[in-house]
Amino acid sequence: MIKLIMGLKGSGKTKKLVDMVREAVREETGDVVCIEKERKLTYDIPYQARLIEAGTYDLGNYEFLKGLICGIHAGNYDITHFFIDNFYKLVNDKSPEALEAFIAWLEKFSAAEKIDFVVSISADPATVPETVRKYII
């Protein structure tokens, strides 16, 4: 399952994501992973969630991000939730086509591995393709 939290800067996306991380830690039996560019959420999310500062890896493109997600999963098959904060800070290509392709890949990965993904994206929801809009909560 994929959920996207979209909105312009200052619309409360990160707060909503943090609330969802807390809920997942409280209610799920598996492991929870939160990926962010910088360590801004260190004191906001529960210590039981694995916080990954992806900025140290200089991801840049979608292939590196896919590799990071697959690598984390390969090291821990007990992961039930991935949360990605400030998605567009992790990748260079902010085009609707690149986002659409990544979300399609994420949907397949999510279904195959039975992992829930929640991604926050600073963008106007009206600017993304219809295939991506269906995931917005």
Image (spheres, helix red, strand yellow):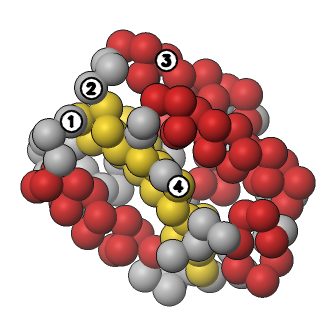
Spatial distance from mark 2 to mark 1, Cα to Cα?
5 Å
SS at circle 4: strand
Q: Does the CB distance between marks 2 and 4 fall below 8 Å?
A: no
Q: Who comes first in sequence, dot 4 or dot 1?
A: 4
Residue drawn where x is 60% and y is 66% of the image:
135
Residue that carries the numbered disc 3 in the rendered image: 71
Residue drawn where x is 63% and y is 37% of the image:
108
Dividing the picture into quarters, in which one does residue 82 lie?
Answer: top left
Mark 2: few, some, or many residues within 10 Å (few <14, many ≥20)?
Answer: few
Q: Which mark is residue 2?
A: 4
SS at circle 1: loop
Q: Who comes first in sequence, dot 2 or dot 4?
A: 4
Q: Does the CB distance between marks 3 and 2 fall below 8 Å?
A: no
Depth check: give the residue in front, 33 or 11: 33
Looking at the rendered structure, the kind of residue marked 4 is Ile
Spatial distance from mark 3 to mark 4, Cα to Cα?
19 Å
Mark 1: few, some, or many residues within 10 Å (few <14, many ≥20)?
Answer: few
Residue drawn where x is 34% and y is 74% of the image:
15
Spatial distance from mark 4 to mark 1, Cα to Cα?
17 Å
Reply above or below: 68 against 61: above
Q: Who comes first in sequence, dot 1 or dot 3?
A: 1
Q: Who comes first in sequence, dot 3 or dot 2?
A: 3
Residue that carries the numbered disc 2 in the rendered image: 78
Q: Which mark is residue 51?
A: none
Q: Does the CB distance between marks 2 and 1 fall below 8 Å?
A: yes
Q: On the picture, is 44 further left or further right than 132?
A: left
Q: On the picture, is 129 further left or further right than 74?
A: right
Q: Who comes first in sequence, dot 2 or dot 1?
A: 1
Residue drawn where x is 42% and y is 39% of the image:
115
Looking at the rendered structure, the kind of residue marked 1 is Gly
Residue that carries the numbered disc 1 in the rendered image: 30
Nearest to viewer (mark 1 / mark 3): 1
